[in-house]
Amino acid sequence: MAGVPMDQREGWIWFDGEFKPWKDAKIHVLTHGLHYASSVFEGERAYGGEIFKSREHTERLIRSGKTLDFTIPWSVEQIEEAKRAVLEKNGLVDAYVRPVAWRGSEELSVPARNNTVHLAIAAWVWPSYFSVEEKLKGIRLEWSKWKRPSPETIPSSAKAAGLYMICTLSKDAAMANGYADALMLDYRGYVAEATGANVFFINGKDITTPTPDCFLNGITRQTVIDLARRLHVEVEERAIWPDELESFEQMFITGSAAEVTFIRSAGPWNFEIGDLSRQLAKDYDDLVNRRLNY
């Protein structure tokens, strides 16, 4: 399916409680979610037919909707059942799963309380965010000119569509300059995250990661922290200034799409791909493929 536009693929999408042929899963151009970003979503992966931490993703989806002041009219159990049905209907075993909820098109103005909340779930074969070659040798990051805003200005705890606008701008600019992704600062000037993944740094056997107080505390991030602590490795969550990157030996990023991806450079600083990074990447791969008890 590589190279086929997303709206022209074959398959089935769960849409408001029923399956629609992929090409017929459409919304109106005056949908509130399109104009005012009243939309939340999840990015999930199925390995061997089982969605990793599926329920945690569904619970976050519902919380994200409530943060944007709307209630998704399906329960956790109903959404869980729908996701399993999407995989089965499309004959997928290893797949990316994308639930998305949004306000509809009854009214088009900033207020949106009279608009119906919709939910759709799609799934397709999508390998890791970065190629196998990139993941093995590490990717290069450019510094973004865009910063993660203060949580007083955005609902930063939600996985909301509008929060990704600056991510798109940052990643597109980085790729145009020959980099794989971009590293973003927050509104205070601290290191925040990549455009769709959390960041970690290693010195010896100590791991440091930014405190997620103005960006998403990713489910993969939390999983990797747990895996590190199972190895009796200290993980410190704190504010990190950009010039501290010179002192770190290793760097990697985490996310459902990126999984665990090594970083070989960020701006002017280079990093090695060391044993601890490799061990955590292996442990994560073993965990999602059920070769490691958790």
Image: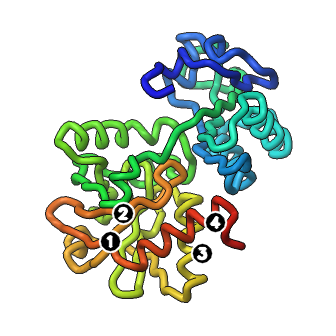
Q: Which residue is mark 1?
A: 273
Q: Secondary structure at mark 4?
A: helix
The amino acid sitting under disc 3 is: Asp
Q: Secondary structure at mark 3?
A: helix
Q: Position of residue 180 (x, y in %)?
A: 29, 47
Q: Nearer the viewer, residue 242 or 156?
A: 242
Label 1 packing within 10 angstroms: few (<14), some (14-19), many (20+): some
Which residue is pictured at 43% across the width and 49% down the height?
196
The quadrant of the image that shows the C terminus is bottom right
Real-space Cα distance between discs 4 and 3?
A: 11 Å
Sequence-wise, which precedes: disc 2 or disc 1? 2
- Marking on residue 287: 4
Q: Position of residue 179 (x, y in %)?
A: 23, 47
Which residue is pictured at 29% across the width and 50% down the height?
182
47 above or below 254?
above
Real-space Cα distance between discs 3 and 1?
A: 20 Å
Q: Position of residue 289 (x, y in %)?
A: 65, 59
Which residue is pictured at 66% across the width and 47% down the height?
46
Q: Which residue is mark 3?
A: 226
Which residue is pictured at 26% across the width and 54% down the height?
141
The amino acid sitting under disc 1 is: Ile
Whether tag 2 and tag 1 are in contact, CB under 8 A, the answer is: yes
Real-space Cα distance between discs 2 and 3?
A: 18 Å
The amino acid sitting under disc 4 is: Leu
- Marking on residue 204: none
Label 2 packing within 10 angstroms: few (<14), some (14-19), many (20+): many
- Marking on residue 262: 2
Real-space Cα distance between discs 2 and 1?
A: 7 Å
Residue 104 placement: quadrant: top right
Residue 268 in sight from this viewpoint:
yes
